[in-house]
Image: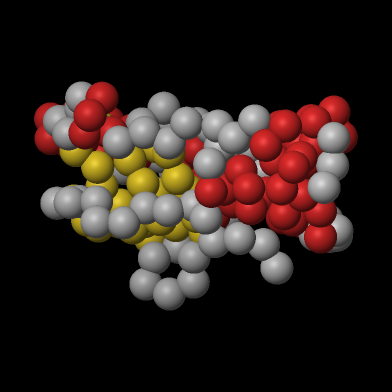
Amino acid sequence: MSTQSRQALTKPIQLDDVSKAIIEQLQADGRRSYAEIGKAVGLSEAAVRQRVQKLTDAGVMQVVAVTDPMQLGFYRQAMIGIRASGDTRELADRLAAIPSVDYVVLTAGTFDILVEVVCENDEELITLLNSQIRNLDGVITTETFVYLKLHKQFYNWGTR
């Protein structure tokens, strides 16, 4: 079972208001210093650093650089809907292991799994579909939704 699958089976972590405020500070600007965050939430720099480490170690959050794939030479992005047979969790783990796949979600409805892929060009997307994704055991059909323009992508939805 993958780490993400195990996390889905665990009880959500209860966060206090200070931890939530730290997360919201980082969602607004992931480069914000621990000292700046500390001033905003009423903690020392060391205390913020410790809390951020605990939150990342617990899998509550990641602090990463979000890039524009087009600016890095990845001119083709797509969402692929997959109809599957068998255990979709196992298939999701195999899909997640493909380097071009950056997002995998189990769904209910027309598709069993949705995957987002980032490729350099259409030829790479065709190869990915035909040589890797469609060849996996359990894949019945795929439907590809090619992105024409990424209109909005934000990660600052806050906490509850």
In the figure, is residue 151 to the left or right of 14? left
Q: x, y (%) of residue 1?
A: 71, 41
In the figure, is residue 72 to the left or right of 53? left
Going by the picture, which residue comes out furthest to the front?
39
Going by the picture, which residue comes out furthest to the bottom?
109
Q: As displayed, is residue 125 above or below residue 92?
A: above
Q: x, y (%) of residue 151?
A: 24, 56
Find residue 88 and report its image quarter: bottom right
Q: What residue lies at 24% left-to-right and 51% top-to-bottom?
A: 150
* Depth order, front residue of 27/150: 27
Residue 3 in sight: no
Q: As displayed, is residue 73 above or below residue 29?
A: above
* Depth order, front residue of 77/49: 49
Find residue 55 and report its image quarter: top right
Q: What residue lies at 19% left-to-right and 38% top-to-bottom?
A: 76
* Depth order, front residue of 95/121: 121
Q: As displayed, is residue 156 above or below residue 58?
A: below
Q: x, y (%) of residue 57?
A: 78, 34
In the figure, is residue 106 to the left or right of 160? left
* Depth order, front residue of 13/86: 13
Coloring applied to the structure: secondary structure
Q: What residue lies at 50% left-to-right and 38% top-to-bottom?
A: 96
Q: x, y (%) of residue 125?
A: 21, 35
Residue 46 in sight: yes
Find residue 72 and report its image quarter: top left
State which quarter of the image contains the C terminus.
bottom right
